[in-house]
Structure formats: C-alpha cells, structure tokens
Image (spheres, helix red, strand yellow):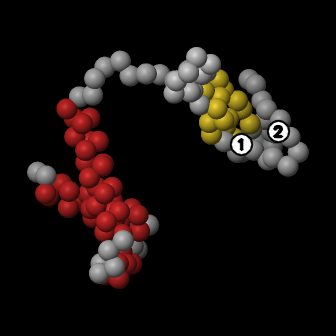
Amino acid sequence: MASVTYSAGIDHVSGALAKPGKSGQHSCEKMLLATHRTAATTSNKCNRLYLRTPVKRTSPLTQREHQIRNRFIGVAAMIQERSHDLSKITTDQQTFIAQKNEPNGAKTMKQWYWRVCGQEWDQAHS
C-alpha cells in the first residue's frame, strides 16, 4: 500500500487534489485523491494518494431518482428561505430547543430544519 509524506508544515491533506478538466485537449481524465485516516494504532502510514478515473453514468435517471432529486432541491430551498425569515427565527429556535433533548429529537438546528421542511414538502406533494 502506498503512503505519502508531505513537506514540513503540512500535517495532512484530505480530498481531491486535482480533478479532471471539463474540456480541452490537455485535460486529464483522472482524479488525484488524497486521504488522511486516523488509525487506532501508532502507525504513521495514515496518508494515502489514489489516482482514479471518474465513473460516468450509463443509464438514464429513473422516475424515483427524479422525485428524490426534486424533493431535495425543494426542501433545500424551503430551508434557505425559512432560516432567513426574521419573523420565524425566534419561534423556530424555541421549538428546536424544546425538542432537542427528547428521544429522536434533532440535535442540530440544520437537522431540525430538514425534518420540519421535509414534512411540509411531503404534505404539500402527496
């Protein structure tokens, strides 16, 4: 297994270091991906580099996948709008804090927004 040692001052790098170009005759078709893994052992071989070819989808989207994507887009827009609506922020925060420590309560405000707006979306589109 390959490991990577970075220059002094760089502890670790994680994520895509180089992505395939969109167009052009000199664009690379591979992705350079670096990962950093914190292991339970004392091994110092926790950095890895991968060169991978992105996979392109060959089949068209199904009706179910279109519905899931449309729901995600709709709920995300609702969250964006609701989180910036000054008339709702105080009541939303109070409602979030009231349910936070209950069983199955949302632990973050963003999670709470996704739950509430997702339920609103489902009621409006069922």
**Quadrant (top left/top right/bottom left/bottom right) for the N terminus:** top right
What residue does disc 1 label? 13
Answer above or below: position of 125 versus 93.
above
Residue 100 lies in quadrant: bottom left
Q: How many C-alpha atoms fall within 10 Å of the one at disc 1: few (<14), some, or many (≥20)?
A: some
What residue appears at the point 72 percent right and 32 percent down from the top-left corner? Answer: 48
**Frontmost residue, 12 versus 106:** 12
Which residue appears farthest toward the left when viewing the image?
Answer: 126
Asked if residue 107 shows in the view, the reply is no
**Frontmost residue, 63 versus 112:** 63
Q: Amino acid at mark 2?
A: Tyr
User: Relative to 11, is 50 on the left or the right?
Assistant: left
**Frontmost residue, 93 versus 9:** 9
What residue appears at the point 35 percent right and 18 percent down from the top-left corner? Answer: 58
C-alpha separation, residue under disc 2 versus residue under disc 1: 9 Å
What mark, if any, has residue 6 been given in the picture? 2
Answer above or below: position of 82 versus 114.
below
Answer above or below: position of 84 versus 117.
below
Q: In the rendering, at what x and y percent does residue 44 appear?
A: 82, 39
Q: In the rendering, at what x and y percent does residue 4 appear?
A: 79, 32
Q: Amino acid at mark 1?
A: Val
Q: Earlier in the sequence, mark 2 or mark 1?
A: 2
What residue appears at the point 22 percent right and 59 percent down from the top-left corner? Answer: 119
**Residues at circles 2 and 1 in contact by the CB criterion of under 8 Å:** yes
